[in-house]
Image: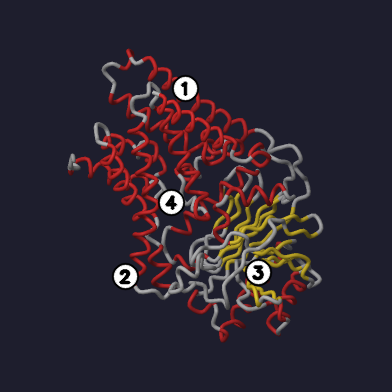
Amino acid sequence: MKSLSPKKVLLSIVSGVLLSAAFPPGGMEWIVWFGLIPLLFSIQDETRSNAFKLGMIAGMAHYLTLIYWIIVVLHTYGGLSYIISVSALILLSLYLSAYFGLFSILIHYFREFRLRVLPAGCIWVFLEYVRGQFLTGFPWCLLGHSQFEQTGLIQVADTIGVYGITFLIVVVNSLIYHLFMNHRLVFRHRWLLWEAAIVVFMVVMVTAYGRIRLQGPLISGEDHFPIRIAVVQGNIDQSLKWDKAFQARTIDRYRALTRSTYDFRPELIVWPETSVPLFFQNKTALSDEVVEIGREAQASLVFGSPAYEKNTHGTRYYNRAYLLSPDGDVTDYYDKVHLVPFGEYVPLRRLFPFINRLVQAAGDFTAGRAKRPLQYRSLSAGVLVCFEGIFPELSRAQVKNGATSLVNITNDAWYGMTSAPYQLLMMSAFRAVENRRWLIRSANTGISAFVDPYGRIVKRTSLFTEAVLTQTISPVSGFTFYTRYGDVFVYIILVICLMLFISRRIK
């Protein structure tokens, strides 16, 4: 068996680190356009098994530096030992790195094809999509997400989603690699020249489309009834959040911050996930105080609070977002649909009885039943709780069900002062572009923000500060191509991958 050379191992590691550097808060998103090239060099002329190993090495270098914050979540706030926390990071990184390994082995598998640049993009998108769906899905920091600040480039997400931008990134990497490898004979490689022309054409078209979208109207059906919205960031310490002795002080803090918005006269005020750290439905004295805050503000109030439901089978607990009217009535609520595995519930509990949930609220959470927006008068808010903002299908479902804006409430205190809150904001911003909706984000410790329908972060807060943001937005009721039809681009890619595989088997 051919052994791995240190040079190729180093190239794989460099590739993984470069890809991590492309994601926030580094601000080096341009690196992703050639971050895969070292990996492609490392796997050339390698055996299939070595290509897989080198892909795994690149993946480990990438994910260990990208999602290192899992140690903070599990150890600092989850109360697990440092050894278990590090082990969990390594295990998750190994799983995610397998997609890098599969990419490398498939590139090796199809290396005899005349077309080499475009298939690389198809393979990567196929694997990213599988990662976003398999085992409840983990579409964290897809390559396309790295470009969230390149406003002109990401406008095409309203048609082909974030996966379309990923495809463009990968084919550019592949094209540069193959042009460098064949630079002396490039004009004799007719197929490579055709692929180069196609890639250049795609880049030009995506750039032109972005410029047109930024200069033109949003989509048909834009409403012209602006709504004044205030976002409150309470900055409640995670270690005190569920302390009963601190509950009254928590409500007092949100009251004071809410009062600071009165000069703006907001029509809607948004508090973060579990900002009311008690069972609001129990009608306690603190629940009455929350109702009184809404009445005093004379605004609708969206806030998070755990909830429960009793039936003959026992008690079910929900991560709930309430909508409180200015009159103090609960007019609607939304229960989180996509729960965090091993955080809000334990999948396959019988197989993993030794794993305790990380959340400190009572009981295991149950997934909500409906992906419907909160309705009050002219307001239709599609709520996304916590990391639901990274799943495109959830935002699409909310918008298709009538949401004229998206509201992401979250408690990112779990992540501490790491890169995770920046990455969450980055991914959530794509939901605004895909559906052409304002995204209102309220986070307990930050980052709270207003993202316009073009994906531009209009206002944002800092981490671990008490803050208030105000903004007047214009709701939108029309549908984009992506909202109507979803990941059609990905489905086309899946068909192409299947055709490539069949063609390879026949050959």
Q: Which dot, 3 or 2, sits closer to the camera?
A: 2
Residue matched to label 2: 83
Reading the chain from its start, which is encountered first: label 4 or label 3?
4
According to the image, label 1 marks what residue? 198
Rounded to the nearest whole Å, what is the CA distance between mark 4 and mark 1?
30 Å
Q: Is residue 196 above or below residue 376?
A: above
Dot 3 lies on which element?
Answer: loop
What type is the residue that disc 3 sits on? Ser
The amino acid type of the residue labelled 4 equals Pro
- Label 3 sits on residue: 260
Quick check: marks 3 and 2 in contact, CB under 8 Å? no
Question: What is the spatial separation of the Cα atoms under label 4 and label 3, in whole angstroms?
Answer: 31 Å
79 relative to 267, above or below: below
Task: Identify the mark nearer the N-term, 3 or 1.
Answer: 1
- Seen as rendered, the residue at the extreme bottom is 245
Nearer the camera: disc 3 or disc 1: 1
Q: Amino acid at mark 1?
A: Ile
The nearer-to-camera label among 4 and 3 is 4
Q: CA distance from mark 2 to mark 1?
A: 49 Å
At a point 65% along the width and 76% down the height, the residue shown is 315
Q: Which secondary structure lies at badge 2? A: helix
Q: Residues within 10 Å of mark 3 (few under 14, many from 20)?
A: some
Q: Quadrant of residue 378?
A: bottom right
> Farthest front residue?
506
Q: Which residue is mark 4?
A: 24
